[in-house]
Image (cartoon, rainbow, N blue to C red):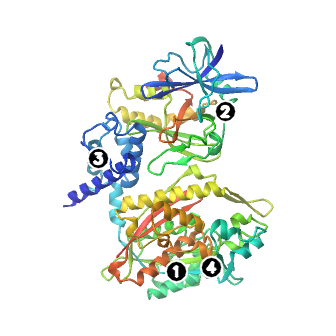
């Protein structure tokens, strides 16, 4: 039986991808439970910070998704830890401060558009944490994107944001029930209070991930942004 | 008439950007079709398409305006027409209005390039830096380097280039309204532009301005000059580049793999407001665009170390990769924005980190290598003057042709940061 601290719940189309931290003899590492038939879960009722009991088959996924483990039975919630403590553990797992160290490989620029990608055989892992020096979220043609500065001074531009809670927050912010000028109000929030709320949070932290290979490219995405959004922030704009 | 022209322009941009994302053969289907829902593009592809359009159209808020709309061609055209209606300049977006105001208002009247008077075979530089003989030639493709003599420096080289450019246009220095200088090696005061002002005997009310950007400096300078002319602040401007690396990147101070790439040179360009009497073989400045790709910021960093040496962080491999990818992207953007085919170019005046990369870039772009003048191979990387010396070489070659046969000139350069910029010149 494995105990997993859930740190990532990301949206992959209609499904969810889940990553947790597993304690090992030499430290803490990321593990991605997958089903026997798919890499994602159609339903996942748990939250970040939940400690789940599960059974994971001891096999590693192919590069760069070496964190994959097949889940052989369902999850059972054992306990939960608060957000700052989750970050304490995340800081002990995979972490990097520069572009090349993120996935242990060179990241390439998309020549015809935006975003960055890794070549599947080159990347040594598919998830990594970092403390961003600055972060901006924006909506581009209905899609939430992030631009952030790494401790090395390098900038990652226009990454898709797949964090479930942040995506849900944006969706809630744009709900028709919230009245007029929803988009303008959300944009104003993202351009002002958002930065203050996130960067002034003493335990702010992000996790970046790589997509599954698609045409021999694994695209960078923002998997997790901590602090997670609070429902009462919606009352502020 | 103008609106038909605009519609054709937008349609071309949309179709080209779409095909870059969806494939060259992809049909531009029903305008109302939801491109994501119907699987034509996934959400990543849709954003790529929109970002490419933002870059090509100059409408940077396109993505934001498309939020809460169907991802379709129809939505894009709607946003274009709304942006136009919203613009205070009635009939054009801000970006369009700016472009219309600056486009073809400045003529590049004359140019000149000079390099350091000493020509040193690259094998000699290998030895001086303690590297195996032939390393610069075999690895980087550099055959020789132009080094300044003891009596030459940024000022003397810059003055020489400027005087020859002025003479070629029969323009007295007293006619200059601005001197815009750029150098990645001159770090003294008075600044280079002030010293050039004095040496050229420009009139006291001629402005002197130094612009940075390292190897991107020439493009920064040309864009500044174009802006001054377009705004009516100036009629005649000299843009001068000058770089003497051999005094800074010396053996013992920096590693040969870095210091051995650089030579010394200068270039000067005389720009004038366009009027009725445009001389033969003159080129008009098209548009310029700039940016900073911060993901490459770590590839090169140079700073003064406390012990008097230079602290150089130079990841040659990462920088080469970045240079090729970004230059290709800039040149594709020049093509997209200008509507000019790169195959029709008289030449490409680009930054040349080293000759091997120029060859590779030409190959990536499917262009003959001789579209890129040999600067780095013979003189080394001249910093901000590389682009200048290349541009001068293309302009000289165009002068030997009938005016009607000369083609546009593409400009593209990079600077640490990674700063990037592009633009074009068209026969006036």
- For label 2, the crowd category at 10 Å Cα-Cα, with few meaning under 14, some 14 to 19 and many 20 or more, is some
Q: CA distance from mark 3 to mark 4?
A: 56 Å
* Badge 4 element: helix
Q: Earlier in the sequence, mark 1 or mark 3?
A: 3
Q: Earlier in the sequence, mark 3 or mark 4?
A: 3
Q: Nearer the viewer, mark 3 or mark 4?
A: 3
The answer to which of A61 and A8 lies nearer the viewer is: A61
- For label 4, the crowd category at 10 Å Cα-Cα, with few meaning under 14, some 14 to 19 and many 20 or more, is many
Q: Residue at x 40, y 50 (%)?
A: B52
Where does label 2 land, which residue? A94
Q: CA distance from mark 1 to mark 2?
A: 61 Å
Where does label 4 land, which residue? B155
Where does label 3 land, which residue? B27
Figure check: A35 above or below A133: above
Q: Position of residue B251 (x, y in %)?
A: 77, 69
Q: Are marks 4 and 2 on the same chain?
A: no
Q: Quadrant of residue A185?
A: top left
Q: Position of residue A45 (x, y in %)?
A: 50, 15
Where does label 1 land, which residue? B204
- For label 1, the crowd category at 10 Å Cα-Cα, with few meaning under 14, some 14 to 19 and many 20 or more, is few
Q: CA distance from mark 3 to mark 2?
A: 44 Å
Is residue B238 visible in the rendered image? The answer is no
- Chain label for disc 3: B
The answer to which of B400 and B85 lies nearer the viewer is: B400
Q: Earlier in the sequence, mark 1 or mark 4?
A: 4
Q: Farthest right residue?
A: B307
Q: Which image quarter is the N terminus of chain B in?
A: bottom left
**CB contact under 8 Å: marks 1 and 4:** no
Q: Are marks 1 and 3 on the same chain?
A: yes
């Amino acid at each position: 039986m494995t105990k997993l601290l859930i740190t990532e719940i990301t949206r992959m189309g209609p499904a969810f991808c889940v990553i947790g931290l597993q304690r090992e003899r030499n430290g803490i590492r990321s593990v991605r439970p997958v089903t026997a038939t798919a890499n994602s879960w159609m339903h996942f009722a748990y939250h970040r910070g939940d400690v789940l009991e599960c059974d994971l088959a001891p096999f590693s996924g192919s590069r760069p998704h070496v964190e994959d483990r097949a889940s052989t039975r369902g999850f059972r919630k054992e306990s939960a830890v608060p957000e700052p403590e989750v970050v304490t553990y995340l800081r002990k797992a995979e972490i990097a401060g520069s572009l090349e160290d993120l996935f242990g490989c060179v990241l390439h620029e998309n020549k015809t558009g935006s975003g960055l990608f890794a070549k599947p055989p080159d990347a040594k892992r598919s998830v990594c944490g970092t403390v961003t020096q600055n972060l901006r979220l924006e909506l581009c043609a209905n899609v939430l994107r992030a631009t952030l500065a790494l401790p090395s001074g390098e900038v990652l531009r226009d990454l898709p944001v797949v964090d479930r809670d942040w995506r849900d927050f944006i969706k809630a912010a744009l709900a028709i029930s919230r009245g007029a000028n929803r988009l303008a109000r959300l944009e104003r929030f993202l351009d002002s209070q958002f930065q203050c709320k996130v960067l002034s949070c003493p335990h702010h932290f992000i996790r970046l991930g790589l997509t599954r290979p698609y045409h021999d490219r694994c695209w960078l995405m923002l998997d997790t942004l901590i602090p997670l959004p609070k429902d009462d922030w919606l009352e502020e704009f | 008439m103008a609106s038909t022209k605009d519609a054709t322009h937008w349609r071309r941009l949309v179709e080209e950007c779409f095909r870059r994302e969806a494939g060259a053969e992809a049909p531009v289907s029903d305008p109302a079709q939801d491109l994501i829902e119907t699987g034509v593009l996934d959400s990543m592809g849709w954003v790529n398409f929109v970002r490419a359009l933002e870059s090509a159209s100059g409408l940077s808020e396109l993505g934001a305006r498309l939020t809460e709309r169907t991802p379709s061609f129809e939505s894009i055209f709607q946003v274009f027409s709304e942006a136009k209606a919203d613009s205070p300049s009635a009939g054009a977006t801000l970006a369009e209005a700016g472009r219309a105001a600056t486009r073809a208002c400045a003529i590049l009247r004359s140019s000149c390039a000079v390099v350091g008077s000493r020509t040193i075979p690259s094998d000699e530089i290998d030895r001086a830096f303690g590297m195996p003989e032939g390393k610069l030639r075999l690895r980087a493709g550099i055959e020789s380097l132009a080094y300044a003599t003891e009596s030459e420096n940024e000022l003397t080289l810059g003055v020489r280039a400027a005087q020859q450019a002025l003479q070629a246009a029969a323009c007295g220095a007293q006619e200059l309204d601005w001197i815009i200088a750029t150098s990645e090696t001159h770090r003294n005061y008075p600044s280079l532009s002030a010293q050039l002002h004095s040496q050229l005997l420009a009139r006291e009310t001629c402005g002197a301005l130094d612009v940075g950007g390292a190897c991107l400096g020439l493009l920064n300078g040309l864009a500044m000059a174009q802006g001054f002319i377009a705004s009516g602040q100036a009629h005649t401007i000299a843009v001068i580049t000058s770089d003497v690396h051999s005094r800074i990147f010396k053996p013992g101070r920096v590693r040969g793999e870095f210091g051995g790439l650089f030579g010394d040179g200068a270039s000067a360009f005389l720009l004038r407001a366009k009027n009725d009497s445009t001389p033969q073989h003159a080129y008009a400045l098209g548009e310029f665009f700039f940016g900073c790709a911060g993901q490459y910021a770590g590839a090169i960093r140079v700073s003064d170390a406390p012990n008097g040496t230079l602290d150089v962080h130079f990841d040659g491999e990462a920088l080469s990769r970045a240079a090729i990818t970004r230059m290709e992207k800039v040149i594709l953007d020049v093509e997209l924005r200008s509507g000019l085919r790169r195959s029709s170019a008289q030449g490409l005046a680009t930054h040349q980190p080293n000759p091997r990369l120029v060859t590779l870039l030409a190959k990536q772009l499917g262009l003959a290598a001789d579209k890129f003048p040999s600067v780095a191979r013979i003189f080394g990387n001249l910093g901000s003057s590389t682009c200048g010396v290349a541009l001068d070489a293309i302009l000289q070659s165009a002068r030997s042709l009938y005016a009607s046969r000369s083609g546009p000139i593409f400009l593209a350069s990079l600077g640490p940061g990674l700063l990037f910029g592009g633009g074009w010149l068209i026969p006036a």
